[in-house]
Structures are given as structure tokens and as C-alpha cells.
Image (cartoon, grey):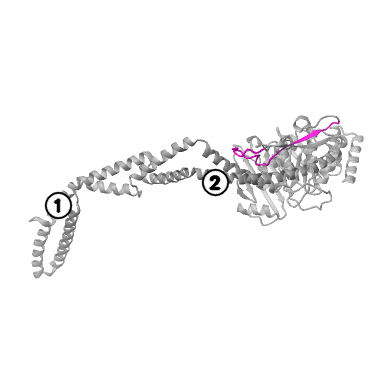
Amino acid sequence: MIHFPHQPFCEDDSVAVLAAPMLNCLEISQFALIDHLSIEFGPGLNLLTGETGSGKSIVVEALGLLLGERAFTEMVRSGTAKAVVSGSFDVERNSHLEQLLDAAGLDFSNSELVVRREVNANGKGRAFVNNQLVPVGFLKEVSGYLVDIHGQSAQQNLYDVSSQLEWLDAFAQSGELVQEVGQRFRELHSTLLQIQSLRNSEQQRLRTLDLLAFQVDEIGKYGLKSADEEALLTSEHRLLAHAEKLHESASEAYGELYEVERSATALLKHSLRLVEELAKVDERCRPLAEQLQSAKIAIEDVAFSLRDYLSKIEVNPKRLETVERRMLELDRLKRKYGKTLEEVLAYHREKVQELEQLQKADQTLATLEGKSQELRLQYLDRATELSRKRRAAAARLEKKVEGELAQLGMEKSRFRIQFSDITPDPPAEDRAEPPGTARGIDAIEFLLNPNPGEDLRALARIASGGEISRIMLALKSVQTIDASSKTLVFDEVDSGIGGQTADIVGQKLKRLSKRNQVICVTHLAQVASYADDHYSIQKRVEKGRTRSLVSRLSGQERIQELARMMSGEKLTDTVLQHAAELLKSAAQAG
């Protein structure tokens, strides 16, 4: 998709220059043909040139990766473990960017922002902002405040009517209104879906009512109150099922400890008397008597506890039968409505709510229908206002784009924005869909007539690659730069043009670079002559491996590169002189 800066289009070229984010340094390691590149960009117009296949567009691809584009294993240089791309951005204080970073828990204490992306040979990777690990998707959010990349794919997106509508809305400064229309659309759509669901099948509603009523009654008739009931019943059942055995064992133990003639208590009493007699004569036996007395008391306590326990043992076959029946009822409920009694109770509460909602369906339907009518009016009101704003902006944009195209060698071209109303007339009140879309009630399409006497036609049907490049540049050239502007990156925006038109493209890029940093890949000497900073990308084979190198050109080096771009490898004095004159002319025009 095309990325759009959050700023209005230019009404006056004399707008004051405002500080914009700037890419200071881009470092690329083990990326495609590049083993290592470090490019320090400057403000203004930065041009990348080089022979076909040297790696110019690879630099743009690396920058796209840094800004959150999809990674591929093919990006990692053969024989290496991972590719790394990092960029240092000079960022003026930006409240929106600061809020974004703060919400993510990232430090941002100065005007420098460092972004790094790593891609492993196995396809996995990591992303960092100011040396702090972040999700890769977060890079796209950050990049929205840093860079716009306009490559061949971005130009192709101009053929898409959805992207064209985004351009028009950006020009019309209607972002807030578009969001409002979208919110109204979603609210209306959700309400209409609820109405449709209620209306779909009255018979189904009645069948559901019967089923819910049966389930609620079935769970309710068993009087289930607590999820603890099953555990209590299990404990009680264990005691009732073994009551006779418990009574027999406790009774026998009590007898042997206390009740029979030679019980443990009786034997201890006899032994205690004998030891006490010993203690009267020999005091050394006194502790033994005390121990026997303690043992006698302990055994009596156990015996009395067993006696109390015996009195509470209930041999009750009827109660046992009742408990077993209740446990079977609970098992039946669990088989039908949940694995545990807690799940059964939760299911019961849920179905009670559903039953109440269905029983109130008629009242709910009337409420929703009233709400939908109100939301429909709100949507149409905002969408109509948005449509008026778009149509007024379209008339202005048509004139401005035609003016820019005239300067780009398409002076006879006509550019129009065609509107189609997608609102049903009259709007059907019972439609399941809102009267429009989340983008409003307009369908638009950019039309072009590049040749006099021909009809206006859609860009996708008539515009060539060179023409679409110039239309893209024309749209960008009418754009005003404000505090939320970004670095603009153009990948061969000058394809398909040459001669005087190429010179004008260079002037356009130069003019854009006075407001914010521009990085451009070009194959035209006329465009390259306007560079503030000129970089040459070269491909070399060293030790059997192909690698791309970059060098910043100045003085005679620039003249030679421009000459190469004009005539190839054969650099004659005439070509070199022409290149020098081209640089001089560009400097005077700039």
C-alpha cells in the first residue's frame, strides 16, 4: 500500500520549511549482494546511481525491511547466518511519535532514533528500536512517522481505486471525517446484523426458546445450589455404605480398651496398684507409676472417644438409598451439561440469560430498529459532508495535477476524478448493509487523457509506466510539508521519461528536497545532476563472490558518473564536457 504523510497538500510553494525527520546513516550487512554498506545521507536531495544490477534498488529494499516490510530468506547473503539493516534517524520532537514510543515502554530521550532489523537464514528475525527489542509489526507504526517509500509497487498502487481515494482524502484533509464516517458505518453495520439475526427465523427462535426452557427447568428441578454438593455426598456415602463395619470395629475396640473384664484399662489399673506398692518401698519406682497413670488416662480418653463415635454411627439403608439416587442425578446432569457441577451451574446461568434475551426479542428488535434509523441518519449526514468535501477538493486537485503534468512534458493531458454515488436511491430501510461503505458514499476513479482528441480513461487502462511515474511525482509535488513530514524515497520514479522532461523531474525532486530529505534511485543523468549528495553503487567480483559497493561522488567523479549515465563506458571529451555543463546548469537552476 502507499503510505501517506499526515499533512495537507500544498496551496502555495512559498510555504516555510519546517524540520522533518532525516535518515542520517543506513548500514546494511549480508543483505542480498551486499556484504557491508554504510551510507551517510545528508539533508536535501540524495541520489543513488549505478549500472543495472549493481544493487541500487537493493538499498531501497533494505530500507523497506528496516521499516517493517516482509522478510524473505533470500534476503540473507548466501553462506551467512543473518542479514542486518540499521538506520539512524534525526527526529525532531514529535508528540505523536513520543506517545507511540512511551506506550510501548521505549526510551526516547533525545532527537536520535536508531532502528535495527535482523533476518536469520532460517527466516526468523528480530527488530530493535533504540536497542530495545520490539515486535516486527511495531516497525511499521514507527515508520509511519519517518519515511515514505515510493517504488514501482507504490506506483502500481495508483491504478487501484482504493489508493486513489486515499490520495484524494489526504489532499482534502478529511482524515478525521473519514474516521468518523467509518465509526458510524461500523456501528450501523453491527446493529443491522443484530436485527437480521433476530428476524432470520421466528420458528428457529421458538424452537430455541423451547429447548432453553427445557434445559433451564431440568437443571432447576434438581435444586442444585452449590458445586460442593458432590464432594459432601461422596463423603456421606462412604460412611453410610460402611456403617455396619464401622460400628463393629469401633464397638470391639471400645470393649477391649475399657468394657470387658480383662480390658486394657482394667489391666493398667491392676498394674498401677502393684507399681504404687513398689513405690511405697522404693521411690525409684515412682516415675513408673506416673507413666502408667498417664497411659491409663490416655487409653480411657481413646475409649470414651470411641464410645461417642459409636453413638453417632448411623446404619440407615433408606438414607444410603437417597444419597445414591442423588449422586446418580448429579452424574446425569454432568453427562449432559458439564464435566463438573461448577460447569453445570455456569451453563444454567448462561441459558437463563439467553432465555431472558429471547423472551425479550420483540422488545429488543423494536429498540434496535429505532437505533438503526438514528445511526443511518448520522451515517448519511457525515458521509454526505465527506462527499461534498471530496468533490470540492477534487476540482482543486485536478487543476494542480494538470499544472504539474504540463511541466513534466504532459502539457496536453487532462486529469479528472470521476465520482460514482454508491448510495441506493431511496435507501432501503430494511437493508442488512448500510447505505455505503466504511469510506463513505463515494466511489472515485482517476481518469487521464494524455493525448488531445481522445476520451478520458481510467489510469489502469491507459497510463504507461512513464506516465504513472509522472502522475505520482505530480501528486507528491503539490504536497505541503509540515511538522509531521517524512523522508521521501523514490525508486526510479523517472522510469519511461527522458530529455527535457527528465530535467523537470530533477527540478521537482530538488524542490521537494527543500522541504524534507529526499532519497532517489535514478538512471537519468539529468535527474542525478540536481543531487545535493550523489552516491554511486557499483558491483564487483572479489574472490569469486559478487558484492555491491557504495561511494560518495564529488567534483570530477560526479562528472564522470553523469557522462557514464549518458553514453555508457565510452567517455569522450564531448560527453564529459556535456556532463560538466549539466551539473553547472542544475546548480544554477537549483
The image quarter containing residue 585 is: top right
Question: Would residue 587 be counted in the magenta stretch?
Answer: no
**SS of the residue at dot 2?**
helix
Could you say which is closer to the camera, residue 165 or residue 194? Answer: 194
Local crowd size for mark 2, using a 10 Å CA cut-off: few (<14), some (14–19), many (≥20):
few
Q: Residue at x 42, y 40 (%)?
A: 212
- The tally of labels here is 2
Mark closest to the chain's N terminus, 2 or 1: 1
- Return the mark for residue 251: 1
Task: Tell me if residue 339 comes above or below residue 286 in the rendering.
Answer: above
Residue 367 image label: 2
Residue occupying the point 53% across, 43% down:
365
Disc 1 on helix, strand or loop? helix
Boundaries of the magenta span? 426-452
Point out which mark residue 184 bears.
none
**Is 11 situated left or right of 160 in this image?**
right
**Which residue is at the front of the view, 171 or 392?**
392
Query: Residue 441 magenta-drawn?
Result: yes
Amino acid type indicated by mark 2: Thr
Q: Answer yes or no: is residue 560 visible.
A: no
* Front-lying residue, 76 or 472: 472
Place of residue 2 in the rendered image (x, y in percent of width and height, measured from the top left): 71, 40
Residue 289, x across and y down, in percent: 13, 65
Q: Above or below — where is 445 with respect to 138?
A: above
Q: How far apart are marks 2 and 1 (CA)?
A: 73 Å
Give the residue type that dot 1 points to: Ser
